[in-house]
Image (spheres, rainbow, N blue to C red):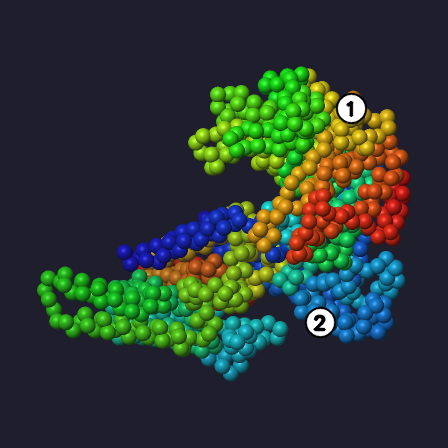
Amino acid sequence: MRKLLLLLSVIIIGLVFTGRLLYLQIYQSASNNLYDDNAIRKEFDYPKRGFVYDRNDKLLVSNQPSYDVMVIPKEVKPLDTLEFCSLLKIDKAKFIEKFNKAKRYSPRLPTPFISHLSKEDYAVLQETMRKYEGFYIQKRSLRKYETKIGANVLGDIGEVNVRDITKDNYYRSGDLIGKQGIEASYEKTLRGQKGIKFIQKDRFNRNLGPYKNGTADTLPEAGKDIKITIDATLQAYGELLMTNKRGGIIAIEPQTGEILSMISAPTYNPNSLVGRNRSENYTKLFYDSIANPLFNRSLQGVYEPGSPFKLMNALIALQEGVVTVEEKITCYNGFKYGKRAFMKCHCSFGVKNNLIRGVQESCNTYFGTVYKRILDKYDNASIGIDNWSKHIKSFGLGDFLNNDLYVGQKGRIPNRKFYNSAYPKRFYSTYTMSNAIGQGEVRTTPIQLANMIAAIANRGYYYTPHVIKEIEGKTLPENFTTPKYTTIDKQHFDPVIEGMLKVYEEGTAELLKIKDIEIVGKTGTVENFVKIDSVKTQLTDHSIFVAFAPKDNPKIAIAVFVENGYWGSRFAGKITSLMIEKYLKGKINRKDLEDWILSHSLENEYTKQYSGAPFKINGQTQLQVIKPEEYQKLKRRINQLN
Amino acid sequence: MSRQTDRYYKFDWLTILLFFILVGFGWLNILSATYGGEAIQYFDLSNLYSKQLIFIGLSVVLIVFILSIDAKFYERFSSIIYLLSLFSLAGLFLFGKNINGATSWYPIGSFTFQPGEFAKAATALAVAKYVSDLNTDIKKFNDQLKTFALIVLPALLILLQPDAGSTLVYGAFFFVLYREGLPQIYLIIGALLILLSISALKFGVLAVLAVATLLVLTYYFTLKRKSSFIQPIIVLILSAVLAFGVRFFYDNLLPAHQKDRITIWLSLEKDPDKLEKMKKTVAYNLNESEKAISSGGFNGKGFLQGTRTTGNFVPEQETDYIFSTVGEEWGFIGSFLTVLVFVLIIIRILILAERQKNQFSRMYGYSVAGILFLHFFINIGMVMGLIPTIGIPLPFFSYGGSGLWGFTILIFIFIKLDSNRINEW
């Protein structure tokens, strides 16, 4: 027994050590990797970020070099401070302050000393830099926007935040990433793949040379150039027209779903978010909670659609067979659909409207009646509204469009389930009568309306609206190249389109006609309210217009939304008409119309709700005219476009 | 069969083979830990690995010398060797050179010589000689005391240098004496002492006393024949004194760095901020060494490919922390095989010791096995964080001439003794 004590101790300790080795080298080492190894320095090689071109090959976004003076405090030798300071255009106190700051951060690691040198300073410095040991110039790449327009489309890039890093381990602190717009939605395409060099270091952070002789290193892969569907000229034109107004414009090519322009007003110069002033400017934009320039109104603005929505009810009524094209419905200056329920209409008392006239006159009674019939077609209005909802959703309304845009909103197309909480038991068609005229519970965004009108232009199908036209060496996703069919048969579109055409020929939009082009459109005027000191207060109506042109073989479908622009053809209609003319004809013949839009501002409409004083709306307001010099400036810019 | 071959045949070639495997593999790791990435210059003496290569060469000369001396010489001259060794230890206080706070070295030109590494073999010889004497009976208290004195004397001189780690190695003689018949009570008391000390630190004095009281009472009441109360009360008082003593020693007397090592080992620090700070200061070495071993994974990063070894992340890596190089570059496979070879050589020496016909050889062999075992256990246990940090080299692996020669002498004296067992009657 006594002989065994040491023998057993040796064997037991041998086993314990083996167990410990298993724990350290098998169990614990499973979580080790090269990237977290503090004995390996990772040096990244950033590739060129891809360029962005518009549909006509106009360069929109490129890169520009930026130069930083870097310092490694430990390697700095005594130098002629005075001369060096004058080269850098700083004074000696600043030099000492910056140098001490860098030293505090780390005496051995490079720290930016002066960021974003101008090209001229760089040229001078480059010659003399060798004299100053411990200082060197590092070249970095910044984005350059070759245009002042399209900030909402193009977006911007900025340093990654913690969320980006945790979401995708490709990114390291300090990397750049697309923050908004195209830069964000095509981030992976544009950025390429950064290369990585593994450098072995010692515990004092000194380089010992490449790890495994560089066999684990990777080469950078350049970002790909892309071509987007935006027409830069049309985009610029639209942005100028929307100056001093708020709202959004979406123009789509119906045959492809390509977005020709996507305007959100107010907007900003994309170059303001590049380089030295980025953070200052971004903060300014971000905290402007009233004008909200970072909010993309054409994608994120959720509004009641108003009258353009009547087109949907007309189409569904025909599809469901609850009305014929010929049937006339009498308007009694409104529509009485319940004991105390009455929907007013501007039609004269006793007018009889068929479908075409109903669309042309935008008769509330007509659409109230057909809406009720659609819902009451089945024994139960619950089934009716679900069926109605399904038809509408087939136009891409009430849902994200599954497109390639970075932001968006679902909007809302109610079904029975939506009304569950309000009407848990009984449900009648009359409860939701406002939906007939696009004012009840329905909510849409401008891009959804544009897509709806594109589907009408195509007589029954649409392509998912998208902004990408070409990616170097890649085909577009199938989602963008296959048509989506609506639940409405082709033959039902023609009477509705005829009604819309009449809007231009005889109706309210007669003034907006363009020579030789048949425009098919529909106006909308939407009541809207805000809460001021918790009192529900009505503001001037929103001005909406949707249209496509030409009637046969349509080239452009467009939705224009002008906040508080009063009635449909007052602002939105005029802008729509000008946009169509600009796109189809390349130039504007109706200068008077253009001048009217340019010279009128709605800024006073937007500020009055914050003034604290009582204010008037709609008909009782005075339109604001901008100052002549401001007008001249806009005029000059618009003339430069041609 | 000629007489010549007959004599070589009697050496235990298996032990010799294992010895050279360890020395050779050890040198490869010293090379890894000390070369700076430049071309390897085997004979440039400014490189530690070149120096170690020379030490290894000289140790071969030493081996030939040891094996050619008559086996009886070691037994006969053991007292003189022991005395010389004591003088050399004592002489350090006059002529020694202080390195890293310990006066353990004689300076000889550009080299240093550490007598403590040779004192182990000398003490082993002396203890074996004394206990194997016909007049000595290890079961007698008087003789026990004299034996202990033989062991404590060199241990004390080393402790005064101060080199607490090397002192601990003298605990190895417990295994030897126990094998030779030291009363059972020493083992029991020793084990209880260790248990009590650790528990007092980890769980607190009161918890220890509570458990001790419970145990003593249970023991007392299960006794058939009730004896007086006095015995259990003495046991209780003793354990109370010991528990408080250990606590007091830890809190007030222990040098700060040793206290921190125990704190880390027993996870006594609960404040995560302080713990994080400790990892960067007192536990830096341990932390980096565990990281290096862990980073080796199953296969290891390959010879000369260890990033942490090359980057000098583990200080003292060529001496006490050499096993972290094995772990990083040779992975689990290499580390496991190293542990295995150590276990095999110790077991082989034990087997050889048991087959000795005279008590002197057997005791000496047992001492060799015990000393190797304690070095192996303390060093690798420390590098992997299983026991508190104790500075002690890993035999055959750690850089240093004195250490290598000390172990060479220790082992090859025994190989010589073993080869001569046929002639013993």
Name the chain letter of the residue that bears numbered label 2. Answer: A
Residue B327 appears in the figure: no
> How far apart, in angstroms, are the residues tagged by discs 2 and 1?
71 Å
A430 and A81: which one is in front? A430
B112 and A492: which one is in front? A492
On the image, the x and y values in percent for residue B139 come to 25, 68
Q: Is residue B24 above or below residue A220?
A: below
Name the chain letter of the residue that bears numbered label 1. Answer: A
Residue in the picture at 44% in, 51% down:
A18
Along the horizontal axis of the image, is A323 left or right of B406? Answer: right
Q: Quadrant of residue B423?
A: bottom left
Tell me the amino acid under the disc marked 1: Lys
**How many other residues sit within 10 Å of disc 1, few (<14), some (14-19) or many (≥20)?**
many
Find the residue positioned furthest to the front. A349
Residue B213 appears in the figure: yes
Residue at mark 1: A551
On the image, the x and y values in percent for residue B329 come to 57, 52
